[in-house]
Image (cartoon, coloured by chain):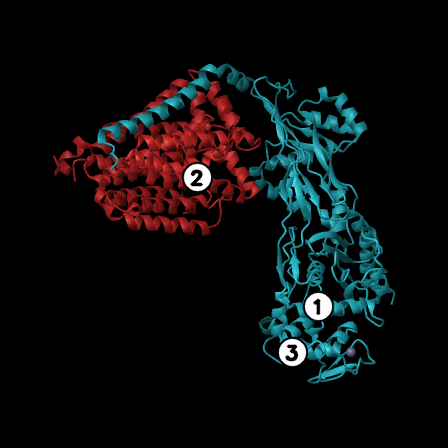
Chain colours: A red, B cyan
Amino acid sequence: MTGGRSLGFSRDLDGGLLAAVVLLSAAGVLSVYSATQVDQPALAGLWQRQLLWVALGLLAMALGAALPFRYWEAFAWPLYLAALGLLVLVLFLPAHQRTHRWIDLGFFQAQPSELAKLATIFLLASVSDKWRKARSFVLRYGLPIVLTAAPMALVLIEPDLGTSLSFPVILLAVLFWRGTPLRDIFFLLSPLLSMVAVFSMPSFLVFVAVLFGAFLLFRVRFAAALPLFLLNIAIGSLSPWLWHGLKEYQQKRILIFLNPGIDPRGSGWHVLQSKIAIGSGGLAGKGFLQGTQKKLSFLPAQHTDFIFSTIGEELGLWGVLLLLLLYGWLLYRGIQIARQTRNRFASLAATGIVTVIGFNVVLNIGMTLGVMPVTGIPLPFVSYGGSAVITMLAMAGIVLGIGLRRYEY
Amino acid sequence: MAQEIGSRERTLALMAICGAALSLLLVRSAQLQVFDSSKYGMLSRQNRLRRIDLAAPRGLVLTADSVIIAESRPGFNLVLFATADWAAPVSRAASLLALDSAAMFAAVTGQRRQFPRDPVVLVRDLPPPLLARIEEHLDDLPGLRIETASLRRACFGPVGSHLLGFTGRIAVNQYDSLRDYGYGLDDFLGKGSLEQQYENILRGSDGYELYEVDARGRERGAPQALEPVEPVPGSTLRLSIDWGLQLAAESLFAVGQKGAAVAIEPSTGRILALVSRPNFDPNQFATGIRAADWNRLANDPDFPMWDRAVRSAYPPGSTFKVVTAAAALEESLITADGRMPRACGGSLRIGNRVFKCWDKGGHGSLDLHGAMVHSCDVYFYQLGLALTVERMARWSRRMGLGDRTRVDLPIESPGLVPDSSWYRRRTGPGSWRGGVAANMAIGQGELMVTPLQLASLYGAIGNDGQRWKPHLLVSAETAEGAVFRKELKIYDRLPLSPATIAALKRALADVVNQPGGTGGAARVAGVAVAGKTGTAQNPHGEDHSWFACFAPADRPSIAVAVLVENAGHGSAVAAPIAGSIVRTYLGRRQPRSPGQATLAAE
Ligand SMILES: [Zn+2]
């Protein structure tokens, strides 16, 4: 079972995952078609381009599946450094819409942060497995944190707050999957909790109580608990100081990010329009191509970031359920592949990819439903856009490729 | 050793997390699409939700003596909302107001070409009779609406205009980058000076209300489900400006006189008055400036919009001699009572050029004190030759020239301190050296300072070398009165020894108060003023007149720099203005002490 790549190809190909990805991409093309049926000449014909992106993406997927995962591991460092280089380069290129996110390739705009996510997954999967049993705290946790923070910081200054959030999620997923004790994960996260909790007295008291609960639960010795406690308090008390160091408009951006309702003209308005579109769809929806909110194009991004609101309006709760089931099935198959894969690097990489896909789904749909911050994160496989569609399909292809070789060591 | 999580548990946990997250999305979707679907369905069916912005009033600007110099007043605009069938109501409104409907049509189509969905303001700041007429007929004007706007008023018109700045409509090319910050196409924005610098404090944030409108575009009231978002008024700025002093200082300039005056409190850096003449009326911009007014302002050869106090740099003339003297003392080239090798006979020959002293009769042999008091150029030519351009440039920079003071205004000129490499770049290597150094020593040539820099420098000398960063903001408080920002008080020290500073202060006091001193015109009864005149050579016309001073000389509570363009000698024009500013400020503050009275009575 281990050797026959050519023999085992069809048998080990994860048909369920493949089907979910293809169906989602097809749903994406149809949704883009519907969302651009408005009287704006600039949007006409975008669905044909989306079809082209999907076709290119399927090629990338095939390529991703065909390449053995050893290549990814062998090239993890060069890929990572190249991604960092592109992230630096993009900062020096002319801004599009006041952000430095895109490299214009003429026919196509590439987003280096997409590559950076993949490269970070590979590198973290590679190094964190090697350093898993390292005695030194620095190797075990410090370096992975630094390797995650570097691309994250570069993406943050583009600025692209939404995409930058993927990086800590990748780190968490990889650490979790490699078998990091729950205790360590908790104490890696607790300084972040402390930084958030410190902004109000009750939440800070709750945080301190949770911290002491954790000390008891994990039976942390007093000699270790005291410095941990002090460290948490110290890092927590830094955050108001950092906050006040920000310029007023920067603070405002962050507050609007967390709560779009306070921004009357910008994102709050978009979220309201998105909720009206989805809510008015009801149980059965208004029917494909029949969305009335969509036709008035209140949402400038209704074919990209807010495409879910068109789907919700036209296909109703049943359509939403179907879409969520497809994503659920995709995630389920992805996790199964990660579980069955014997090579530790490949298993970790698959987990990282599946987590990023899931995280983007939740962030994007949550945004259109008004329960998550407004970020520029597209809906995987569905939103219009070449860079995102191709990267997502390539990622899915890599998971399929890992699945093909799940019994290799 | 803590337990690692097993493979089976990991798988289950990850699946549980994914499942839970997707389920929550489904629940939220069901909440919108099943439980709230009638509410959103209704909103979507009537669909024509119209957003009415509720303008936030811009914050007040208060001076140190609690005078309101800028406030907001409500105004009423006639606004077109409808994006279709608007021609009839717009032409009807035009005839009601007896305005040109063709111009209105052009405005609507012009804006709609670029921003098809944004409302168009047809008439701004409707006067009461027209407002009443429109409101009477509003029912017959579907798609039109009266919207309240907050309009800026500079309470003293042109007085202090360069201090305050103005608010103007957002330019179309700015709008794209500002809409993310909550600005509307029709909003006003601080432009220039404090209105621009503290835009974020003054602005507040607009609210909005959602109305339903029927198919004809008429409002039917707010839907119950949606609450209005209240506007948050802008915050109040409290300035260091002493408005009484500002008014007095402005009145000291004659109509048509161009120049600037800056008064600073040396022990804090607070700016007490900031005058630039000619000035302009910020209220012209309150509802969008008319093209004719704008052309008049922009094409005025006297540049009334230009803030001469902080944006213009001039050669400092003899006011620069304090820097030359300080550099020479610090470099130990002279002692306070040492004399120059050549006595002043009215001129000095350097190479094949003759450099004149301002006094043709000559001053004879002087020590530093005498040379400062009589402003003897020949003495300083020799000092400049000994110092060299390089060392004078270094000391100028150390004393804060050639660099922005970092006052809290959006634009400030750094002035210019040319050094030898600057001259090499400009004129190539050559024989400029001697003449340039001599000229620079008396503040002529390419060296440039702003009135603000000079006031700050003289204040620092008076304050025994402690130089406070000049600033205008004392505090910012919310409309409810909660202070959320305090003035930034920071200082550095002039790199001068106490002996040097004492020598400079003594000399500057005698410039004004000793018989025959060049600054006699700035004398103030009962107060020892210490200062220096200056005359900046102007190749394009009459020389500019300078005076810089601080008072009382021992522990100054005010430092002043005055520049009057094309007014000839500093002693004749700028010095009396500076003296009057000092007199106004100190006259109100402190009773005269007998000791000081004898000093000035002389
Ligand atoms: Zn002389």
Q: Is residue B46 visible?
A: yes
A161 is higher (above) or lower (below) than B511? above
Q: Quadrant of residue A263?
A: top right
Q: Chain for mark 1?
A: B
Of mark 3 and mark 1, the one earlier in the sequence is 3
Q: Secondary structure at mark 1?
A: helix
Q: Report the residue marked by disc 1.
A: B502
Do labels 3 and 1 touch, CB within 8 Å?
Answer: no
Dot 3 alpha-carbon crowd within 10 angstroms: few under 14, some 14 to 19, many 20 or more: few
Marks 3 and 1 on same chain: yes
Residue depicted at 20% across the width and 32% down the height: A340
Q: Quadrant of the C terminus of chain A?
A: top left
Q: Secondary structure at mark 3?
A: loop
Q: Report the residue marked by disc 2.
A: A233
- Residue B291, given in percent of the width and then of the height, sits at 74, 44
Q: How far is the residue under mark 1 from the one under mark 2? A: 52 Å
Q: Secondary structure at mark 2?
A: helix
Q: Is residue B293 left or right of residue B54?
A: right
Q: Report the residue marked by disc 3.
A: B333
Residue depicted at 82% across the width and 60% down the height: B527
Q: Chain for mark 3?
A: B
Q: How far is the residue under mark 3 from the one under mark 2? A: 59 Å
Q: Chain for mark 2?
A: A
Residue found at the far right of this picture: B601
Residue depicted at 79% across the width and 69% down the height: B511
